[in-house]
Structure formats: structure tokens, C-alpha cells
Amino acid sequence: MHKLISLEKDKYDEYVKNHKTKSHFLQSVAWGELCKVKKNLTPYYLGLVDEDNNILASALLLQKHLPMNYCYLYSPRGFVMDYQDKKLVNEMTKKIVKFAKSKRAIFVKMDPDIIIKDNNYLNEEIPLEYDPKSIFKTIKELGWKHLGFTKNFETTQPRYSFRINLKQPIEEIESHFSKTTKQRISKAIKLNTIVEIGTQKDIKEFYHLMTLTETRKDFISYNEDYYETLYEIFNGTESSKATLFLGKVDLNKTIKSIEENLKNVNNQISILPIDNLSKSAKNKLKELTRQKENYTKEIKKFKDYKKEYGNRLTLSAHMIIEYGDKAWVLYAGNHNILTETYVNYNTYFEHLKYCKERNLNIYDQFGTIGDLSKDNPRLGLHEFKKKFGGDYVEFIGEFDYIINKPLYFIFTKLVPIYRNIIKKRSKKELKNEVNRTK
């Protein structure tokens, strides 16, 4: 007789992080505890066990409390189990629904970590090891309502992402980068940009860059304390890890590097026989003269930057989450100055190599779009992530299991309006906070 029980956190995390296919940080104890502290949700760490207490499936359920003692339950990235096992999916659904009814839940939501389409960097479709249509049919037949194949960020978690297979040699991974990305990383390295691993004391700087980025994109998500708490919780257990990468520029080093380039160009010009130039030599002189002018302008520009901002600046700050065999680029903030140094590209490259060196298998850039029309305001984000050559993956989407139909109807009609009001209010408050710190 199988039972759905509450698992000890350590036992729960051990099962989830080691699951062959469904290990995900959104199902971790760390994420559950973060949601408890910062989002006022109640986490339940549940396991379906057999007679010998062997775990067959698990689920983090986040309880959102509603008026009149109602609630809804959300399992981010779905239950951790083999979705090809129809009997197991059936049993887990029944047990979860029974649990949900005991909590007076209006519905249960999940968005399983099931890829339904995978295209490589050449846009060639990669065959999946399972039949997503069969899994989709199984879930639907059990009473789950699919909320549609959305194309943007309408769902709780992104339905599209780019994932890089870290089991490939690093040389092969680099070969999938776009030509532009390779050039920009190369330039960032030549300009002596620096990428360092930060500590908790650097969260303030990270938050500042996040606010700059979010203001440019016209949305602000979390306050500084949220990132502080996330960093503490994910680094407070052996199962998970949050790492802060800081992309910096040392303008003294950058200027010195450009001055060396200028010196090299001047030396090449000095040895050309100016009075008797062949056609190829004239072309070379023209190119060297162009380089000299560019280097001279760059030196002046960076010296002006140094006068205004000081010598050492943090231009990019990215937070990487590790859990199980995967890593996610969860948050990335960038300054709006000195973009010509391409520190952001170098920062991505460094934490990609870092994840590879840590023997992780998957590097997930965590979110992009499915609507690739030219007028989509998120297209720039998509194109940037695409340049790193990962697989463009599409997930199965969100499902709701409706328990109380009348209340579900009211909730799905009224809550979006309420959330929009709260979002606008939070955005205004955070913008005021940013303005006060300027």
C-alpha cells in the first residue's frame, strides 16, 4: 500500500537532487524555505512511498493562503517522478488531490519539467527519449486542465529556455557560440576585464545593477532583502548553492592595454617605406591609420570614464543557482555604461566554464520567449541568449487540477486584476526606493 507522507527535509532533498531526470532547484527545500520567508507561502515536502518507505515520487507543494480559510497549492516544475509511468502519475495525482482537499484548496497547479521540443543551435530538432504527446494525454485524462501553449512570460515559470549540455568538451561548447559572441568575449579579454566570484557583502552592488536593468526593461521585481535571503538560504544547505559572479573593469589596465595596441600600430607604421609604397602597402597603411585613430579615441574615452566614475567598476552581476546536476542563470544585472567593454559576455563565459569545471551536466539560461516576431519587446533577450549556442527547449506548460469550480472561476477572473494592482504599487515603491538611493 503506497502512502503520501511528509518527508524530512534532508531525505526529501536527497531524493530530489539525485533524481535522474526531474531534479530542479524549484523543487528544492531551499526554494521552499525562501518562499516561506519571503513570499508568505507554506511549503510541504511530500513523498509517495511504498511499504518499505522507498520514495517513488515527491512534490514540493507551496500553499497560498486565501480568504475564508481557502488556498491553492502550486508545485513549481511539477512532481519529481517518472511521467512515463502512467500508474504512478495516476496514483500521485489522486494522493495529491486528496491532500489538497484536506487543505481546502480551490485547485492545484503544476508546470512539469517536461520538454516537448528541443532544437539545437543549428535549429535542428533533437529526438526526445520519450513521447511528450503520450505524457500530455495521460495528464489530461487524469483531470488536469492545460492552460495553453503560451508564447511569452504569461505562466508562473518560463515555458521556453536555452540549455547547454555541459557534458560536451568546452571547445565544442565554444564552437556553438555565434561569431559576434566570440568576438565580444575576445574584446572583453583583451581589454583586461575581470570576472570575480562575490560574497554576501556584494549583494548590495548586485541589487543596484538589478534595479538599473529592471528599470530599463520597465519592471522591478524584488527588493534587496529578497536577494540577501535567497543567497543565505541556498548557501545554508549542502544540497544547493548560490554563486555571485561580478564582471568588472579596471580602467588603468584597460587603458594600458589599449596604449600597448597603439604602440604596436605606431611601430608597424614606422617601418613602412612611406616614399615608395606598393598597392598592398598602401592598403596596410590605410588600415593601420584607421586602427591608430580608433585606439586614440578609445584611450581618451576610457580616461574620461575614469575621471567620472573612478578606476574600478562593477558592470555586471549574475547569480547562478546550482542544484543536483544542473545550474541556472537565475538573475543578471548590468550597468548601462561601458557596454563597449562587453563585460556581460565575459561574465557569462566565465560562469559557464565554472559550471563545466564543477562537473554539472546542464546549464540553463532560465527563460526566453516562443513568440519570435520582430515587434516582440523581449526579442533582444532571446537573441542574446541564443548567441551562446544552447538548445532551444520548449516545456509542456501549466496544468490546473480544479477542485472547487465556482471559486476557481472567481479566482482566475479576479486575482489577475488584484495582482496587477499590487505589481504596479510594488513597482512604484521600488522606483521610489531606487530614486532615494541615487
Image (cartoon, rainbow, N blue to C red):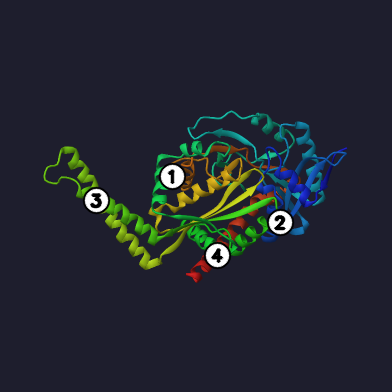
Tell me the quadrant of the picture where the N terminus can be found: top right
Q: CA distance from mark 3 to mark 2?
A: 62 Å
The residue located at (50%, 71%) in the rendering is 436
Q: Can you tell which mark lies on residue 375?
A: 1
Q: Residues within 10 Å of mark 1 (few under 14, many from 20)?
A: few
Looking at the image, is mark 2 or mark 1 nearer the viewer?
2
User: Is residue 140 among what the camera can see?
Assistant: yes
Q: Can you tell which mark lies on residue 1?
A: none
Q: CA distance from mark 4 to mark 3?
A: 45 Å
Q: Does the CB distance between marks 3 and 2 fall below 8 Å?
A: no
The residue located at (71%, 39%) in the rendering is 144
Callout 2, which amino acid?
Glu
Callout 4, which amino acid?
Lys
Q: Position of residue 107 (x, y in %)?
A: 73, 47
Q: Earlier in the sequence, mark 1 or mark 3?
A: 3
Callout 3, which amino acid?
Asn
Q: Residues within 10 Å of mark 4 (few under 14, many from 20)?
A: some
Q: Position of residue 425 (x, y in %)?
A: 57, 63
The residue that label 2 is drawn on is 33
Camera-side residue: 194 or 30?
194
Q: CA distance from mark 2 to mark 4?
A: 22 Å
Q: Can you tell which mark lies on residue 204?
A: 4
Q: On screen, 392 above or below 13?
A: above
Q: Can you tell which mark lies on residue 267?
A: 3
Q: Secondary structure at mark 3?
A: helix
Q: Secondary structure at mark 1?
A: loop
Q: On screen, 222 above or below 51?
A: below
